[in-house]
C-alpha cells in the first residue's frame, strides 16, 4: 500500500466540498443520481440531483466487453433496460442504443460522459462517490477508470479530479489497484460487515460507506467514535425515511446517501431551525423514534451479518 497520509481536512485528497461546506450537517449524496424520481445512473438523474442541491453523486460502475466504463448498478440489464444480457457481455455500441424502462426513457452513460457533465461551470462543487462493482477484475477496471479520468481535461474552475472523485469498493482486493493506477485518489470501503471494516481503520486514504441498519444495531456500537478517532469519514446508505435522516444528523455522519435529496435537504433545513430556536428544539421526540418495522430491519440486518458475514468476508 501507499505511504500516503490519512485523509483529513488539510489533505489535498479530501473531497473539495468539505473544505468550503455551508453547513456542519451531513452532506447530501444522491443515490444513483436522483433515483427516487428519475431513471437511476443516468445523466437525467444526475442533472436533477444537482438541481436539487446535492453535494455529491453516488454512482455504480461496470465494464463493457470492449473495455468501456459505464454506469449500471446491476451486472444484468434486465431490471433497468429489459434486456436479458449482462453488461460484461455487451460492447458499448449495443449498450448505448438501450433506453431505460422508466420514463423518461434515458440512455446508459459512460463514466467519461459524467465527468464531462460535472466539469461544466456551475457544477464544480459536485463530487463523485463511485461504487466499483466487485464482479469486475480489480486491475482491469481500475486501469480503465484511470484512463477515463486522465482523458478528461481538468476543469478550468474548481479543484482537480483527485479532489472530486472517491473510489469505492466492496473488497480490500481493490485497494492496491486503486493505489497503483490512481495514487492520489481517496478510497472508500463499502460495507455492512463492520468487523471487516474495522481491519482497515488505519489504512491510508480510506473512508467508510456503511449500511445504516447495521450501523444502528449492536454491531455498529462504537464504530462512529472509532472512525472519528482515526479521522475517517463515514457515509451512510441508503437513507430515505425522515427519522433515519435525523438519526444521521444527530450522530454526525459525514454524508447521507439517499434516493430523495430534496427530502433530505428539507430535513436539514428543519433541523437547523430547531437548533436555532429553543422553543422548537426537541419539541417532538416522535420525529426520531424508530418504527417497529425499522427496529425489525435493524435486527434482521444484524442477524444477517452474524450468520453470513464470515462467508462474505471470506469471499472478499
Image (cartoon, rainbow, N blue to C red):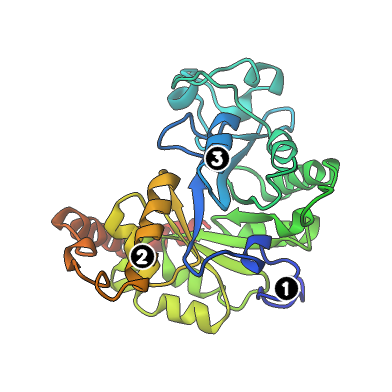
Q: In the depicted view, which residue is nearer to us: 275 or 251? A: 275
Quarter residue 112 falls in = top right
Question: What is the spatial separation of the Cα atoms under label 3 and label 1, in whole angstroms?
Answer: 28 Å
Q: In this view, does 211 lie above or below 249?
A: above
Q: Is mark 2 on a helix, strand or loop?
A: helix
The residue furthest left is 292
Classify mark 1: helix, strand or loop: loop
* Residue closest to the far bottom: 229
Q: In this view, does 136 lie above or below 6?
A: above
Does residue 293 appear anywhere in the picture?
Answer: yes
Q: Residue 258 carries which label?
A: none
**Horizontal relation, residue 309 to residue 80: left or right:** left
**Pair 2/1: label in front:** 2
Which is nearer the N-term, disc 3 or disc 1? Answer: 1
Instruction: Tell me which corner region of the image, top left, top right, bottom left or bottom right, holds residue 247.
Output: bottom left
The residue that mark 2 highlights is: 273
Q: Quick one: label 2 or label 1, which is nearer the N terminus?
A: 1
- Residue placed at 54% from the left, 55% from the top? 170
Residue assigned mark 3 = 51
Spatial separation of the CA atoms under disc 2 and disc 1: 32 Å
Q: Quadrant of the N terminus?
A: bottom right
* Residue 292 location (% of width, % of height): 14, 57
Q: What element carries label 3?
A: helix
Few, some or many C-alpha atoms within 10 Å of disc 1 (few <14, some 14-19, many ≥20)? some
Residue 191 on image: x %, y %: 47, 60
Residue nearest the observer in this picture, 169 or 44: 44
Residue plotted at (42% across, 76% down): 223
Residue marked by disc 1: 11
Amino acid at each position: 500500500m501507499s505511504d500516503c497520509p490519512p485523509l483529513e481536512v488539510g489533505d489535498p485528497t479530501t473531497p473539495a466540498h468539505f473544505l468550503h461546506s455551508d453547513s456542519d450537517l451531513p452532506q447530501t449524496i444522491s443515490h444513483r443520481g436522483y433515483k427516487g424520481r428519475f431513471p437511476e445512473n443516468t445523466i437525467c438523474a444526475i442533472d436533477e440531483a444537482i438541481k436539487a442541491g446535492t453535494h455529491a453523486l453516488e454512482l455504480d460502475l461496470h465494464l463493457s466487453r470492449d473495455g468501456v466504463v459505464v454506469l449500471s448498478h446491476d451486472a444484468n440489464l434486465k431490471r433497468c433496460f429489459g434486456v436479458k444480457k449482462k453488461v460484461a457481455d455487451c460492447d458499448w455500441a449495443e449498450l448505448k442504443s438501450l433506453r431505460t424502462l422508466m420514463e423518461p426513457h434515458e440512455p446508459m452513460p459512460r463514466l467519461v460522459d459524467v465527468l464531462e457533465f460535472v466539469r461544466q461551470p456551475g457544477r464544480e462543487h459536485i463530487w463523485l462517490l463511485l461504487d466499483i462493482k466487485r464482479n469486475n477484475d480489480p486491475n482491469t477496471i481500475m486501469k480503465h477508470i484511470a484512463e477515463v479520468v486522465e482523458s478528461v481535461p481538468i476543469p478550468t474552475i474548481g479543484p482537480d479530479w483527485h479532489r472530486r472523485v472517491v473510489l469505492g469498493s466492496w473488497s480490500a482486493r481493490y485497494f492496491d489497484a486503486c493505489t497503483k493506477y490512481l495514487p492520489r485518489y481517496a478510497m472508500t470501503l463499502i460495507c455492512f460487515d463492520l468487523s471487516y471494516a474495522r481491519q482497515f481503520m488505519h489504512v491510508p486514504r480510506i473512508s467508510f460507506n456503511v449500511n445504516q441498519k447495521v450501523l444502528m444495531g449492536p454491531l455498529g456500537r462504537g464504530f462512529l467514535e472509532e472512525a472519528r478517532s482515526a479521522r475517517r469519514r463515514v457515509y451512510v446508505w441508503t437513507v430515505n425515511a425522515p427519522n433515519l435522516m435525523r438519526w444521521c444528523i444527530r450522530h454526525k455522519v459525514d454524508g447521507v446517501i439517499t434516493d430523495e435529496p430534496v427530502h433530505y435537504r428539507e430535513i436539514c433545513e428543519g433541523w437547523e431551525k430547531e437548533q436555532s430556536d429553543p422553543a422548537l428544539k426537541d419539541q417532538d421526540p416522535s420525529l426520531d423514534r424508530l418504527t417497529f418495522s425499522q427496529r425489525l430491519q435493524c435486527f434482521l440486518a444484524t442477524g444477517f451479518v452474524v450468520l453470513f458475514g464470515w462467508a462474505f468476508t471470506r469471499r472478499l
